[in-house]
Amino acid sequence: QVQLVESGGGLVQAGASLRLSCAASGRTFSSYAMGWFRQAPGKEREFVAAINRNGGRIYYVDSVKGRFTISRDNAKNTVYLQMNSLKPEDTAVYYCAAGYVSTEYLYYTERPYMYWGQGTQVTVSS
């Protein structure tokens, strides 16, 4: 069992930066691939970024490439999402998730992620 707690969300203006953190409980954090997803009002939850167990493989949705950076610190049981050049369309609740991912394309889907945080709100004003 893994518990995930996100933090770092807030209200910012367009062009600003935020860093989200997701702290995991338990001693098996390094066994899991980690993902960030987001859900905007009235929309389905969508993939944002993912990182494999040792940080050697990273994946992003096209809309955040070059602006967001996912990273992890296995010693601190934490995954991060650095978000730069934020846009109003980035406004959403951001969730982190943990799971076992066996195939590359699955990183982009919710299917392999067994544990989810409660989400943190990111609001970007224009």
Image: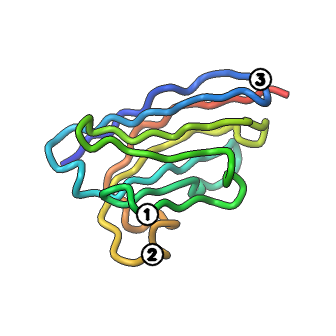
Measure the alpha-carbon separation of dots 1 and 3.
Answer: 31 Å
Check disc 1: other Cα within 10 Å, few if <14, some if 14-19, many if 20+: few
Mark 3 residue type: Gln
Residue at 44% over, 53% down = 35
Mark before the other along the chain sequence, 2 or 1 = 1
Label 2 neighbour load within 10 Å: few <14, some 14-19, many 20+: few
Q: Amino acid at mark 1?
A: Arg
Asked if residue 47 lies left or right of residue 77, the reply is: right
Q: How many angstroms separate mark 3 from mark 2 (CA)?
A: 34 Å
Toward which corner of the image does residue 24 lie, by quadrant? Answer: top left
Q: Are marks 2 and 1 in contact (CB under 8 Å)?
A: yes
Name the image quarter holding residue 10: top right
Q: Residue 118 at what x, y percent from top left?
A: 42, 37
The extreme front residue here reads 56
* Rendered image: mark on residue 67: none
> Closer to the observer: label 1 or label 3?
1
Amino acid type at image mark 2: Glu
Tell whether 76 sits left or right of 109: left
Q: Residue at x 22, y 37 (%)?
A: 25
Q: Nearer the viewer, residue 32 or 43?
A: 32
Which residue is identified by label 1? 57
Which residue is identified by label 3? 13
User: Which numbered disc covers residue 104?
Assistant: 2
- Total labels: the figure holds 3
Rendered image quadrant of residue 16 = top right
Please report the residue visible at 33 percent of the width from the left and 38 percent of the height from the top: 78
Q: Secondary structure at mark 2?
A: helix
